[in-house]
């Protein structure tokens, strides 16, 4: 879904430092939504950290203590979830940057949804689809638009607090129905199979949006407080929300960013990325895990699946607990680093937290995969899948 960008160049730009080929980078940012979104995230992250440093002088001392206890190898961030390559060697600079960045990014979400830069374009020209108007028995106004698609499609949808539901249909068209908002939905085709669903240039503050898409369609949804639901057969999904709950089942790879909304992902593909502040998350992967990246501040995260050869699972938490329920065919090397969290090891990896701090290391099965968990006060629980009802 997302473009693999040059993170170092974006970080330097966010810090106001010179970058090589600035003109080329500016041109790339003008045409790449993923990199523009990442740059906005990095700039907002720095702004929030500066503000919090002024308001809470003790924060620096807190993170100083955390940084002193986190070894460089553990704190290194896993690669973006889209790559299945092994983890690169940890960088020598900013040894705890990945952990702090996850926390700061979560704070950005908690401050307000504006930091995520919801981008709603000016009213689009009428689509080539068919628009129908009707009255529902509930007297809520509704409107519908449909547009035939060719090849692989990616649906982009941005709204405010309207609930969004996306399911698949056997047809080769995207069909959207809006209820209770009094707007005409418009579908606009773009390059590379992109289709934008807009609402007269408005961010819907009420109502419901139901969308039917061809099987395998990728979906990118941004919302503030609306709930998001996605059904079986959808391709890659990306959801950005502040307080809306997210539920998806039978999708391919998934990326979810939320502040306080709860997240439930069931039978997802082998790649998943989650960022949350206080929302709780439950992720069950139907396929063997390949790249899993979990970040939370105070929300609890429960993950279930198989982590074996080629699997890279990284989890970072401040005070949220992390529970990993592992299928019997899993095989991985474990590394758990915490300041004051506890370890519960029901799968018998042999890991034990040493006296005086330091990482706990262990091994399960073949040891071909890698599980790396870092917390401040959050605890880690490892359990066999049988103990979780096989789910």
Image (cartoon, rainbow, N blue to C red):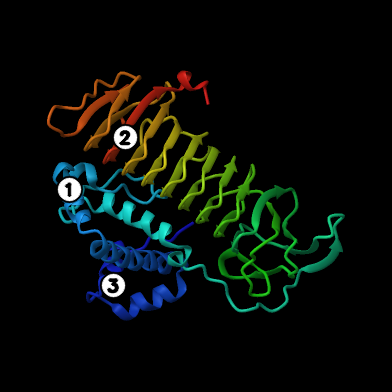
Question: How far apart, in angstroms, are the residues tagged by discs 3 and 2?
Answer: 32 Å
Residue 362 at what x, y percent from top left?
Answer: 24, 26
User: What label sits on residue 67 in the rendered view?
Assistant: 1
- Tag 1, which secondary structure? helix
Please say if 258 is above or below 17.
above
Please tell me which of labels 3 and 2 falls first in the chain: 3
Badge 1 vs badge 3, beta-carbon distance below 8 Å: no
Q: Nearer the viewer, mark 1 or mark 2?
A: 1
Disc 1 crowd rating (10 Å Cα; few below 14, some 14-19, many 20+) is some
Q: Residue at x 28, y 45 (%)?
A: 87
Q: Nearer the viewer, mark 1 or mark 3?
A: 1
Location of mark 2 (residue): 371
- In the shown orientation, is residue 132 left or right of residue 322? right
- Tag 3, which secondary structure? helix
From the viewer's side, name the closer residue of 107 and 211.
107
Please tell me which of labels 1 and 3 falls first in the chain: 3
Disc 2 crowd rating (10 Å Cα; few below 14, some 14-19, many 20+) is many
Location of mark 3 (residue): 13
From the viewer's side, name the closer residue of 288 and 116.
116
Please say if 47 is above or below 276.
below
Residue 2 at what x, y percent from top left?
Answer: 45, 59
- In the shown orientation, is residue 236 left or right of residue 98? right
- In the shown orientation, is residue 97 left or right of residue 128? left
- Tag 2, which secondary structure? strand
User: Splitting the image into 4 quarters, where does residue 335 fall?
Assistant: top left
Residue 275 at what x, y percent from top left?
Answer: 41, 50
Please say if 205 is above or below 374.
below
Residue 319 is at least partly visible in this image? yes
- How many circles with numbers are drawn on the protein? 3
Badge 3 vs badge 2, beta-carbon distance below 8 Å: no
Q: Residue at x 59, y 40 (%)?
A: 249
């Amino acid at each position: 879904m997302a473009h693999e960008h040059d993170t170092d160049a974006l970080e330097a730009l966010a810090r106001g430092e010179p970058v090589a080929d600035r003109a080329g980078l500016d041109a790339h940012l003008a045409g790449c939504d993923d990199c523009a979104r990442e740059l906005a995230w990095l700039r907002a992250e720095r702004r929030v950290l500066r503000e919090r440093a002024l308001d809470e002088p003790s924060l620096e001392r807190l993170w100083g203590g955390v940084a002193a206890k986190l070894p460089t190898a553990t704190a290194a961030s896993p690669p973006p979830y889209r790559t299945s390559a092994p983890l690169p060697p940890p960088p020598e600079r900013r040894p705890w940057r990945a952990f702090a960045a996850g926390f700061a990014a979560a704070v950005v979400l908690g401050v307000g949804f504006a930091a995520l830069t919801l981008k709603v374009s000016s009213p689009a020209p009428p689509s080539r689809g068919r628009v129908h108007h009707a009255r529902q028995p509930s007297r809520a106004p509704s409107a519908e638009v449909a547009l035939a698609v060719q090849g692989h499609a990616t649906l982009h949808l941005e709204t405010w607090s309207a609930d969004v539901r996306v399911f698949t249909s056997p047809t080769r068209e995207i069909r959207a129905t809006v209820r209770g908002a009094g707007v005409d939905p418009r579908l606009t085709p773009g390059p590379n199979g992109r289709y934008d669903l807009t609402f007269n240039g408005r961010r819907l503050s009420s109502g419901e949006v139901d969308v039917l898409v061809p099987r395998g369609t990728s979906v990118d949804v941004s919302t503030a407080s609306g709930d998001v639901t996605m059904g079986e057969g959808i391709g890659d999904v990306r959801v950005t929300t502040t307080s809306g709950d997210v539920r998806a089942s039978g999708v391919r790879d998934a990326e979810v960013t939320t502040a306080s909304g709860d997240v439930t992902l069931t039978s997802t593909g082998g790649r998943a990325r989650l960022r949350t502040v206080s929302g709780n998350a439950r992720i069950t992967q139907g396929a063997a895990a390949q790249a899993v990246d979990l970040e939370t501040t105070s929300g609890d995260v429960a993950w279930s699946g198989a982590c074996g050869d080629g699997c890279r699972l990284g989890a970072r938490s401040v005070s949220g607990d992390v529970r990993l329920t592992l299928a019997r065919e899993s095989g991985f090397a474990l590394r758990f680093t915490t300041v004051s969290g506890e370890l519960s090891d029901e799968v018998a990896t042999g890991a034990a937290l040493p006296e005086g701090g330091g990482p706990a290391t262990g091994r399960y099965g073949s040891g071909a995969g890698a599980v790396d968990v870092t917390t401040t006060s959050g605890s880690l629980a490892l359990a066999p899948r049988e103990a979780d009802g096989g789910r």
